[in-house]
Amino acid sequence: MPALLLTVLYGAALTVAAVVALVSGELGPLWGLTLFSATAEGVTATGPNLFLLVLAGLSWSWGIWQILRGPSAGPPPPRDPDALRLRLALYASAATTFLLHLTASMWADTTVLDSAVMCVLVVLFMRVLGRGRPYMRGAGLLGYGGFTVIGVLGLLGRPVPEGVELVCGLAGLVWTVLVLRAQGSDDRWGTATVAYGVAALVTPLVLVLAALPFAGEEGAAEALGVVSSVLMMIWLARSAHDLAAPRRRPASEATPEA
């Protein structure tokens, strides 16, 4: 019920803000409600930026519902300490992903925290999925451990060697692909959850092309980035929900090694 109530309240506020922007040309309420920042100076309401901001708002609405609704009702699976720790880390990662939208800079303290939480997530996924996955573990620790170090160096004002961010980004991408593959063959996670993960993985590539017609619009990149971030948060939260949801059959004991 709280998830539905919050979704309805946010949707109502989004509708009012969109109408205000459409009628008066004032983007402030809609901009703040969707991008969580002050409107850039001199920006006025246009068809393209209204579309992008409403799209971001609709993404938040759907994310609120998917993230806050919790696991499916019914008898929970047998208690597993590792699964419980993974659930908590998944929720924490979803929360830090959201917090990135509340910071003034992507290389703020929150970014370091987000990468550090993802490192914990890598370790806990290994305990739940099985330890015989060296490539998955290595890719995850290289990617998110590397981003944690890069973030700390950024906070200290230290330079980062050229190409390191690209290597860490590719490693994180490989880890995500391997985790989605493992989830797809493990009946603890539902098909919809894996689909959200795949969507979160490919959406940034699609959005690069989608952003081209809006190249001159202020806030276009931020609004489209919301879509990608919300999909990632939904995947993380649903992955946690599924671990506490009733199961139709026992979880698979053997899954393909990555």
Image: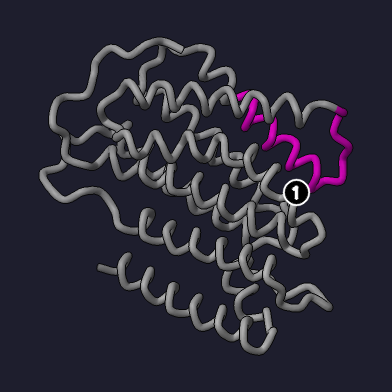
Up/down of 29 relative to 112, above or below: below
Q: Residue at x 73, y 42 (%)?
A: 151
In which quadrant will I find the N terminus? bottom left
Residue 158, compared with residue 161, is above or below; it is below
Q: Residue at x 62, y 88 (%)?
A: 23
238 with respect to 95 (left or right): left
Is residue 150 depicted above or below 156 in this figure? above
Q: Is residue 205 magenta?
A: no
Residue bounds of the magenta highlight: 141-162
How far across and down, in percent of the image, does residue 113 sit? 61, 47
Kindly state the secondary structure of the residue where label 1 is placed.
Answer: helix
Q: Is residue 27 above or below residue 98?
A: below
Name the residue beneath numbered marker 1: 212
Q: Amino acid at mark 1?
A: Leu
Q: What residue is at 41 percent from the left and 10 percent from the top? A: 257
**Chief SS of the magenta region:** helix
Q: Residue at horizontal 25%, vertical 27%? A: 187
Residue 111's x, y, as percent? Answer: 66, 48
User: In the shown orientation, is residue 237 left or right of residue 144?
Assistant: left
Q: Position of residue 52 (x, y in %)?
A: 63, 63
* In magenta segment, residue 154: yes
Give the image quarter of residue 42.
bottom right
Q: Nearer the viewer, residue 107 or 158?
A: 107
x, y percentage for residue 25?
A: 69, 84
